[in-house]
Amino acid sequence: MSELFAQPYDMDARGFYFKDLEEYDTKRKALRNAYGQIVEEFEIQFIDGDDIDCALAKAIGINQANLGRYYSAVDDWNNDQKTRYIIAVGEGGYSESTEPDDLDMDIYEIDSMKELAERFVEEGLFGEIPEHIRFYLDYDLIARDLQVDYSETEIAGNRYAYRCG
């Protein structure tokens, strides 16, 4: 479970930690500043949790308005869906309201573009290449060509090559 912090914009109020939407609502409603006034606006900060959930918070642009969406995504999406969303919204220019299953994109977990080139040759994406010819292929050159269509990123310690449709 992710731990977040609500930092009030009101300089006379103290923020609070919370782990779910219910705890946030309870603490938010009870919070008063030094003058007894209700505190209404907060900056939401990711404090602790899984690396993928931290990247998700950044991609969503976590704030008071989308806090419910963030917690729903953390609870309901698997790591593949989270990764797809993070790449699409954080790097691919998709809208924050995008659903991960609606995305037209190719994602490969790789260490380098050269590894992606080798995988594509192995899978036959460049046609049937006899085994004895494969030793003479310049995988670095193929990798460089793939960079025209594919980009690389790192999420939660894993490297990916991706292409958004």
Image (spheres, rainbow, N blue to C red):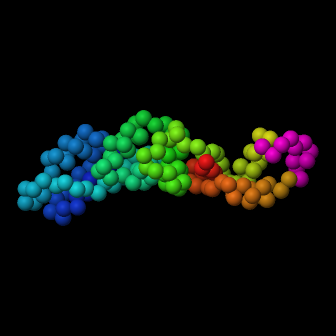
- Disc tally is 0
Residue furthest right as drawn: 132
- Is residue 117 visible to us here? yes
Q: In the image, what residue occupies the spot 33% across and 46% down?
A: 67
Q: Report if residue 133 lies within the magenta region.
A: yes
Q: In the image, what residue occupies the spot 49% across and 37% down?
A: 78
Above or below, 8 against 109 in this view is below
Q: Position of residue 47 (x, y in %)?
A: 35, 52
The N terminus appears in which quarter of the rendering?
Answer: top left
Q: What is the quadrant of residue 22 in the picture?
A: top left
Q: Report if residue 154 lies within the magenta region.
A: no
Residue furthest left as drawn: 35
Q: In the image, what residue occupies the spot 7% across and 60% down?
A: 35
- Is residue 54 visible to us here? no
What segment carries the magenta color? 125-136
Q: Position of residue 58 (x, y in %)?
A: 42, 54
Q: In the image, what residue occupies the spot 23% across and 61% down?
A: 9
Left or right of 67, for residue 147? right
Left or right of 6, for residue 92? right
Q: Position of residue 160 (x, y in %)?
A: 61, 50
Out of 1 and 25, give the one closest to the viewer. 25
Out of 153 and 18, give the one closest to the viewer. 153
Q: Main secondary structure of the magenta part?
A: loop
Residue furthest bottom as drawn: 11
Q: Position of residue 116 (x, y in %)?
A: 71, 49
Left or right of 133, for residue 68? left
Left or right of 74, for residue 17? left
